[in-house]
Amino acid sequence: MAVAAVSKYEFAPADTQDKFHGAQLLYIGWEDHLLFCAPFCFPFPPTMRFGDVVAGPMQAAFGYHPDFARIDWSTVEWLKSGKPVVLDFDKSLADNGLKHKDVIRFRTPGLAGIKGSCS
Amino acid sequence: MSTVFLALQTNEETRPIIEAILQDNPGAVVDEQPAMVKINAERELIVRRETIEEITGNDYDLQSLQVNMITMSGNLDQTDDEIRLFWKA
Amino acid sequence: MDMQVAKKKLGLKERYAVMTRGLDWTPSYQKMEDIYPYMQYEGIKIHDWDKWEDPFRLTMDAYWKYQAEKERKLYAIIDAFNQNNGHLNVTDARYVNTVKLFISGISPLEYVAHRGFAHAGRAFPGPGPRVACLMQSLDEIRHAQTQVHSISNYNKYYNGMHDFHHMHDRVWFLSVPKSFFDDAITAGPFEFMVSIGFSFEYVLTNLLFVPFVSGAAYNGDMGTMTFGFSAQSDEARHMTLGLEVIKFILEQDPANVPIVQRWIDKWTWRGYRVLTLVAMMMDYMLPKRTMSWKEAWEVYFEENGGALFKDLARYGITMPKCAEQIALEKDHLSHQAWSTFYNYAAAANFHTWMPDEDEMAWLSSKYPESFDKHYRPRYEFWREQAAKGNRFYNKTLPMLCQTCQIPMLFTEPGDPTKICYREVDYKGDKYHFCSDHCKEIFEHEPEKYVQSWLPVHQIYQGNCFPEGTDPTVEGFDPLAAVLKYYNLEFGRDNLDFDISEDKKNFAEWRGQATKNA
């Protein structure tokens, strides 16, 4: 459908990749850990190594949760747009096929939040 | 079951109005909340000028209810003599 | 035979007819569509504007008379409130945070509503609706002004309100109410009337004002209670007009029905999402609670809205389909919202805190299905951590919904343990949504919502720092720069209530009010 308008209605989208000074947006959510009220939004260069994302910004963002230190990264299940995906820690975001405004989630088997409440 | 309601501020001006409404609408139920009186009724609620005037002994203009109304529910019809709130279905 | 008969005073119906009919004229040298250029493009067909009737039959002369009376009452009370240090009579200083939320989130919308109704009034060719829009436009600017006047007294003593309008245009969560109203006023005049006049005023406004105002009364805030009631006396009229608008449009042409239904679906959902703020206000921010969000929803939407949509069924209008999802969310909404503001307490213009034991017990009793299972463990953890000096301040920016602009905090309908993710690919870019309803709204008008000014993305684009900021210098602190841009002072306007200046000052002032120094 299109907007009903009195004249031509065409405006540039506000969040295209060119506006982020070389970065692309990546959204990351941790399943069953709603202590963090919503998934996070990060700006990363597409060349950034995925393992560095996990060790740096993700550690900083999720590290408050006592479960974070207990994660066995070899068992973590990743989802991209809700579908299972394999992400290589040694490859860059771009080489892992992650594009601007992609959303990934991770499930950490055995860890279900504060007292198992998914918090 | 379709309820109509009228909510008025709790004050000296609305006291006789609420009394009149309860007199004219035998099925109406009063729900008193902080600083507010909500009057609920099934399908229809009527506010009659004459009843208010009988209670207070003064002339009353129904439009001055504007000052003390808080909220309402239902279709409305207002004349010089009455305000009617109602659901058709 | 000429007899001098005293002229009988006109009845209400005649007075209304005289004051709202035959005031216009048929143009002779301009085309109607040039004078009223916004009447066709939304697809609404109107055949007879005179069928519009205000059921209150309020005319301009009576309007001024009663509005003046309302103002006199209001200002007498505001004066008394101020002269008696009324602010010290509120239950406790946490309460003032509801006032902060109101002045920065709601009052600016009153002003935009004023503009919106002025615009709609200009756009309609019928004098009946023009008069109605004129009155409502005046009401709305009165609300904005009286709210600013009343709340200015709190601003003398408490933090976070000093630049509410500036904040309204910038602060991340305030983009939620702001974009809601911007969405409405940038629609056509008919959609505006359905969105604000009907869906917001009629279907949802009770949930905003009634709990807020009786909450104020219950918490000893006479100033807010009074402006609230004064505004609400106008709302009762707005609601009636909102219902009249719908009936008028639906009766004019059967082709209008599906268009109006889509607007009702959209705007009920949009409005409900904005009320997320009210839900948490009711369940968490009022030290003395009046009713829970869930109870208010049941009375004012389920019961009352149920009766309304049953009544509108004769036009072929049905209950908005989002009502099903809302029913599933009512056990969770306020808790998820409060958790969010607890997370982001460093970036807001009001304080948050963890409920105490009594308050947790109240929440358990009001939400037996959800509170103890899903939210209490989280809160107890946060409370323990805060006691250890490790209060949680989330400093990573959240993912937002493209339509409602709220962080993606809502869970899957029916599963409160999973965040609800929805997405759409449009012209080579991805867009994300909190719900099926926000996604559908986008899909219907993607050209509109690709322009959303999402605060998180704007921060990352570098648009939310004071002019001249260089984010590339070493040690750059983005939160500090963003707070400067918001005109918020770190450590004063934000963070936990427990360590706030508000809490400290209130205790001291209340002590002075009851003791000789």
Image (spheres, rainbow, N blue to C red):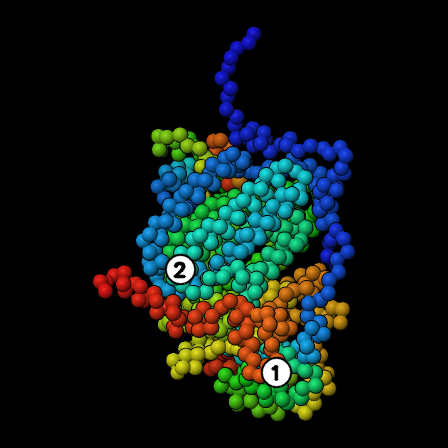
Q: What residue type is labelled 2?
A: Lys
Q: What is the quadrant of residue C485 in the picture?
A: bottom right
- State which chain disc 2 sits on: C
Give x and y (percent) for residue B49. Answer: 43, 32
Of C437 and C175, the residue lying toward us:
C175
Relative to residue C293, is residue C9 depicted above or below? above
Residue shown at 55% from the left, 9% from the top: C2
Label 1 crowd bin: few (<14), some (14–19), many (20+), radius 10 Å? some
* SS assignment at label 2: loop
Give x and y (percent) for residue B13. Answer: 37, 40
Q: Which amino acid does label 1 sit on?
A: Phe
Residue shown at 23% from the left, 63% from the top: C515
Label 1 sits on residue: A106
CA gap, disc 1 and disc 2:
48 Å
Label 2 sits on residue: C156
Label 2 crowd bin: few (<14), some (14–19), many (20+), radius 10 Å? few
* SS assignment at label 1: strand
Relative to residue C492, is residue C300 depicted above or below? above
